Amino acid sequence: MNPDETFAEKSFDDYAAGGIFAALEAIEQATGEKQVTAIGYCIGGTILAATLAYLAATEDDRISAVTFFAAQVDFEKAGDLLIFSDEAQISMLEREIKDVGYLDGANMAATFNALRANDLIWYFVINNYLMGKEPPVFDLLYWNSDSTRFPYQMLFDYLRNLYQNNLLAKPGGFDSMGEKLDLRNINIPTYILASKEDHIAPAESVFKATNLYSGENRFVLAGSGHIAGVINPPSKNKYQYWTNASKETHGEFDEWFAGATETAGSWWPDWHKWLSKKSGAKVKARKPGSGKLKVIEPSPGSYVKVKS
């Protein structure tokens, strides 16, 4: 659901326990499968990485391989968003939303748009307002207008612990669910995707994860930005992606990119090739509700239709 005032006290740990662990339990009920491969996108990837460190610390092997899309875990080079993470601005924001219980989605969208003002603000001012042109019909813009709120407690867990103090990148620096986390304990295979023009999770910042995880890391750089670079099906034949034949992904992003090879089109086939080797045998599609987890209501679900 889109968080409202009832989510005000939901913390980073609540999202891990009530999101990732709840999903793992539901998957096992629905399919009988205990182990899964997982995907984390943006902040979802940050939460997933912390959860994987927790799983490693507690010897829980339910996630056997993981894919990260535009997900930061070391925020040292987190780009222009660091401008908004000094204590004065965080404290001001905290006072503004304390009584509301969440950061409004429109405010968060405006912040992201300001980072790419030429493309996401002035383009529309000039074309739509000054020149009177109709806005382009574009599926990603429609999706982008469906903004998401940010719960009060989770927001400041995120801004102070990660953007401001970069605790998750420090061994034992970040506490979650009673454990001091160390990302170096994550030794399962990881597929790490960044986008070349991403203004929210810069490629240089996403790459730093390769210096933290201890397993087999595959880093891939997609063309375009935070959303379009990820959602780029092969059928569109758009953009490109870069890979580096060297298995050594540690070091600096610029060094990796200097030795990278560009391939036209979507990165999806590369991911499919990687993921298929990390997955089990193909099985027949199951019928929803055939396991222990029963169908709640028809898709897409009533929560999707709730308006802000």
Image (spheres, grey):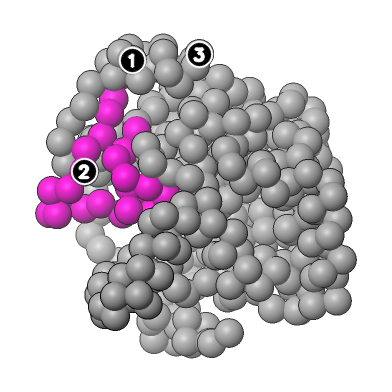
Residue stretch in magenta: 221-244
**Distance between the Cα atoms at labels 2 and 3?**
26 Å
Residue type indicated by callout 1: Ala
Residue 173 visible in the current orientation: yes
Residue 160: give x, y in percent of width and height.
79, 46
Q: Position of residue 240 (x, y in %)?
A: 22, 38
- Work out which quarter of the rendered image holds the N terminus and state it: bottom right
Front residue (pair 259, 280): 259
At mark 3, the secondary structure is loop
The residue to which callout 1 is attached is 258
Of 228 and 15, which appears nearest the observer? Answer: 228
Residue that appears at 66% across and 73% down = 104
Q: Amino acid at mark 2?
A: Tyr
Residue 150 — which label? none
Label whose residue precedes the other's in the sequence (2 or 1): 2
Specify the amino acid type for callout 3. Answer: Gly
Indicate yes or no whether the magenta region holds residue 4.
no
| Residue where numbered disc 3 is placed | 251
The image shows residue 86 at horizontal and vertical percentages of 78, 44
Query: Which residue is denoted by mark 2 in the rendering?
Result: 239
Vertical relation: 271 (above or below) 212: below
Secondary structure of the residue carrying tag 2 is loop
Give the foreground label among 1 and 3.
1
Label 1 Cα crowd, 10 Å radius (few <14 / some 14-19 / many 20+): few
Image height check: is 176 above or below 204?
A: below
Q: Is residue 17 visible?
A: no
Quarter where residue 18 is shown: bottom right
| Quarter of the figure that contains the C terminus | bottom right
Disc 3 residue crowd, few under 14, some 14–19, many 20+, Cα 10 Å: few
Q: CA distance from mark 2 to mark 1?
A: 19 Å
Q: Estimate the x, y position of residue 121 in percent, counting from the top left.
A: 45, 63
